[in-house]
């Protein structure tokens, strides 16, 4: 009887143990590194994974896209290498465009990354890159960004390979100041927002950037999920986190991130619950004629990157929408970084803005502009498919558990009945 009860408990909690959170990648920097830097300074950033040596399965390879402003930073070599990797890892593809690094890496060891470069505080480092601030850079705010369309592959213990994609852009924030400075970084690296259900639309405007401290979040649901991330060692995040029940009109959420020296940064999110409205103003599609967007289009994603040669002065923008669309900043594009905005407005005068970060190369860099390619259909498991698979997996686990519980309950009742019969016979 005791053995059966124990088995019953194990079956009840079995699905909780076998369901694991997916892996993801992010950018990090040392906790003692100031985010205020000056011309000529060299900074180091680390590409990290939450998938470590104690996790089941193997991080076997990944494809990453890292964006930076080429008129602020230049990639520099460390030990005669632009990309430094843990022992046993190798670069299978590397291409540096004007503002974009495409990087593919493969793991040739039977272990996950557990490397500590020099005397670094990080573990699970899967790449190290260094950048130098150019001497002619003007004082400004800038960042290095790991784009969300990164792909990585986990080989499970049964030999099967699963595909994952980052669902958030990850930022490292910097401020260029010719006078220098020493301030530890308490800026968030990303904010995650989503609805309670997949059918509920959630929009954060403007798009997240570490140096923007107030946002509007609109939703049709009654709850939203909010979580702030700070991937600088020693940085702590407090405030609203998880699902938040919305008030009638507007709910205000605050996230406070604190650096190891006590420096704080507060982010404010005004959450607005939409009632009857004319549909949220969004694009159905977005393309740049002759050039590829770095990110795959998603109506909920408001920021996109594109690289163009020095010969182009404007973009040919092809879009589809049910609402009025206005494009600004798409004329006389200058060498370097340009911002083109696409405003979509509905009949309720609500406006949703998309941002195109356009990097126009110097003439000698024109040959490095990515060649236009038709997007390939992804034959790997996509994020949405994985969500469905996880749901199906949990349903199967629960069905197995319920069937097992019924069987064990029947056995227990039969034992009780048999024991009662034996006792009646003895009497």
Image (spheres, rainbow, N blue to C red):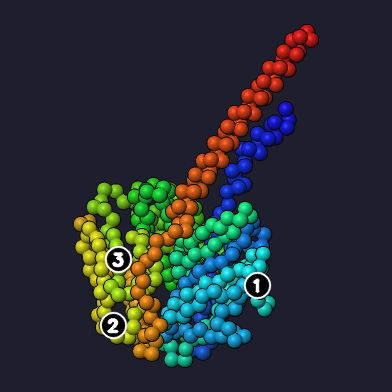
Give the vertical position of 133 relative to 199 (above or below): below
Q: Is residue 215 visible to us here?
A: no
Residue nearest the viewer, comparing 71 with 218: 71
Give the vertical position of 275 relative to 120 (above or below): above
The Cα–Cα distance between marks 3 and 1, rounded to whole angstroms, is 41 Å
The Cα–Cα distance between marks 2 and 3, rounded to whole angstroms, is 19 Å
Q: Quadrant of the C terminus?
A: top right
Q: Earlier in the sequence, mark 2 or mark 1?
A: 1
Label drawn at residue 286: 3
SS state under label 1? loop
Residue nearest the viewer, comparing 92 with 411: 92
x 47%, y 91%: residue = 135
**Closer mark to the observer between disc 2 and disc 1:** 1
Q: Earlier in the sequence, mark 3 or mark 1?
A: 1
SS state under label 3? strand
> Callout 3 environment at 10 Å: few (<14), some (14 to 19), or many (20+)?
some
Whether label 2 touches label 3, CB < 8 Å: no
x 59%, y 28%: residue = 406
Q: Quadrant of the N terminus?
A: top right
Say which quarter of the image contains residue 398: top right
Numbered label tally = 3
Q: Earlier in the sequence, mark 2 or mark 3?
A: 3
Q: Position of residue 367 (x, y in %)?
A: 38, 85
Label drawn at residue 88: 1
Judge from the rendering whether residue 339 lies leftward or rightward of residue 245; answer left or right: left
Whether label 3 touches label 1, CB < 8 Å: no
Say which quarter of the image contains residue 350: bottom left
Q: Position of residue 286 (x, y in %)?
A: 30, 66
x 33%, y 60%: residue = 299
Label drawn at residue 226: none
Residue topped by disc 2 = 312
**Closer mark to the observer between disc 3 and disc 1:** 1
């Amino acid at each position: 009887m005791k053995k059966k009860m124990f088995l019953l408990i194990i079956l009840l909690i079995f699905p909780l143990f076998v369901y694991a959170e997916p892996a993801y990648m992010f950018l990090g920097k040392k906790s003692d590194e100031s985010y205020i830097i000056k011309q000529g300074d060299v900074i180091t950033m680390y590409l990290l994974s939450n998938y470590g040596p104690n996790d089941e399965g193997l991080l076997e390879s990944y494809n990453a896209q890292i964006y930076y402003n080429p008129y602020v930073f230049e990639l520099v070599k460390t030990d005669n290498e632009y990309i430094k990797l843990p022992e046993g890892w190798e670069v299978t593809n590397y291409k540096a465009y004007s503002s974009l690094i495409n990087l593919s890496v493969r793991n040739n060891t039977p272990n996950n990354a557990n490397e500590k470069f020099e005397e670094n505080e990080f573990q699970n480092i899967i790449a190290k890159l260094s950048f130098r601030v150019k001497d002619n850079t003007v004082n400004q705010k800038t960042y290095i960004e790991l784009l969300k369309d990164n792909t990585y592959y986990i080989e499970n213990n049964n030999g099967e390979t699963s595909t994952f994609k980052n669902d958030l852009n990850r930022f490292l924030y910097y401020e260029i100041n010719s006078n220098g400075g020493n301030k530890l970084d308490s800026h968030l690296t990303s904010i995650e927002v989503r609805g309670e259900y997949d059918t509920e639309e959630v929009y954060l405007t403007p798009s997240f950037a570490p140096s923007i401290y107030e946002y509007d979040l609109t939703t049709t649901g009654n709850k939203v999920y909010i979580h702030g991330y700070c991937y600088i060692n020693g940085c702590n995040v407090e405030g609203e986190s998880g699902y938040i029940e919305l008030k009638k009109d507007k709910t205000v959420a605050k996230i406070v991130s604190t650096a190891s020296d006590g420096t704080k940064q507060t982010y404010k999110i005004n959450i607005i619950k939409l009632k009857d409205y004319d549909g949220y103003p969004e694009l159905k599609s977005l393309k740049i004629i002759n050039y590829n967007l770095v990110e795959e289009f998603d109506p909920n994603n408001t920021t996109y990157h594109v690289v163009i040669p020095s010969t182009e002065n404007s973009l040919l923008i092809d879009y589809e929408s049910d609402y009025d669309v206005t494009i600004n900043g798409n004329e006389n594009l200058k060498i370097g970084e340009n911002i083109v905005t696409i405003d979509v407005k509905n009949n309720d005068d609500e406006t949703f803005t998309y941002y195109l970060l356009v990097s126009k190369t110097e003439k000698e860099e024109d040959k490095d502009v990515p060649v236009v390619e038709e997007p390939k259909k992804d034959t790997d498991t996509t994020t949405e498919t994985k969500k469905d698979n996880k749901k199906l997996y949990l349903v199967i686990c629960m069905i197995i558990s319920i069937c097992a519980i019924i069987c064990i309950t029947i056995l227990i009742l039969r034992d009780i009945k048999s024991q009662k019969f034996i006792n009646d016979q003895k009497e």
